[in-house]
Amino acid sequence: MWASVGTDAIQRGINVLGPNNDAAYLWTANQTISSPTPPFFDTSQYYPFLRDPAITLGNDSDEFIIVYGVNHVATGKATYSNFAIYGADTWNGVRAISDADFSGSAEEYLPDNPNAKYLYVYKLARNCTEDDQYCYEVPYGQGARGIELDQPLFIGFRIYLENTTKTGPAYSEIVYDRAIKFDPQD
């Protein structure tokens, strides 16, 4: 979980900057212990699971990250969902990919499977090919407003407003979204 549920945060005295229950917030939580927290206050005491090593995305064409999970809008657990890529050291959000962008992406991996419409698969890379319909090319370099090659990164997931409850879905009722890095050097 990226942020504590609003009512839980209030009871535990955690400042989550506007506690509410509008969404379930998840993240890959792979920053390093030395990565600074956002520029508001020291939240490191609330995130004991931060761990090494830092995840970066180099310029090697064989290095990429696959973001995957349940399309929570397709299952009815959300009215909108997305994932966003952030530079972990400065928390600079680069791009959000929404359910409108990734809907139908798992059908390439699960052809003729009726459950594929409830899943998604999206690629993050420095160099996407023409065949990569579901790929985001992460920018870097001066003026690119992206994530540098040596800058650690993380993925944040947001799952907004379940239709029936008009609140974020309960964490116990969703399958958490995931990301996995593929690197030929490892």
Image (cartoon, grey):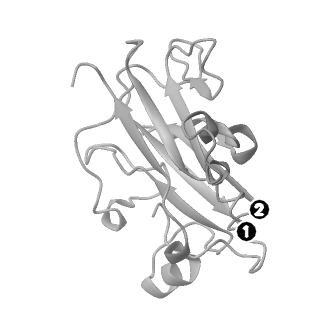
Q: Nearer the viewer, residue 113 or 118?
A: 113
Disc 1 residue type? Leu
Q: Residue furthest bottom?
A: 11
- Could you say where residue 37 lies in the image, as x and y percent from the top left? 40, 50
- Residue 13 left/right relative to 32: right
Residue placed most toward the observer, 72 or 138: 72
Q: Where is residue 155 in the image (x, y as percent from the top left)?
A: 48, 44
> Which residue position is annotated with label 2?
79
Under circle 1, the secondary element is loop
Residue 121 shown left or right of residue 44 in the figure: right
The residue where tag 1 is placed is 161
Is residue 96 in view? Answer: no
In the figure, is residue 75 to the left or right of 34? right
Q: Is mark 2 on a helix, strand or loop?
A: loop
Q: In this view, does 128 lie above or below 136?
A: above
Instruction: Indicate the quadrant containing the C terminus: top left, top right, bottom left or bottom right.
Output: top left
Quadrant position of residue 78: bottom right
Q: Between marks 2 and 1, how big is the CA–CA gap?
A: 6 Å
- Residue sitting nearer the eye, 154 or 14: 154
In x, y percent, where is residue 149?
Answer: 39, 19
**Amino acid bearing label 2:** Thr
The percent position of residue 27, horizontal first and vertical second, equals: 46, 53
Quarter-wise, where is residue 166 in the image?
Answer: bottom right
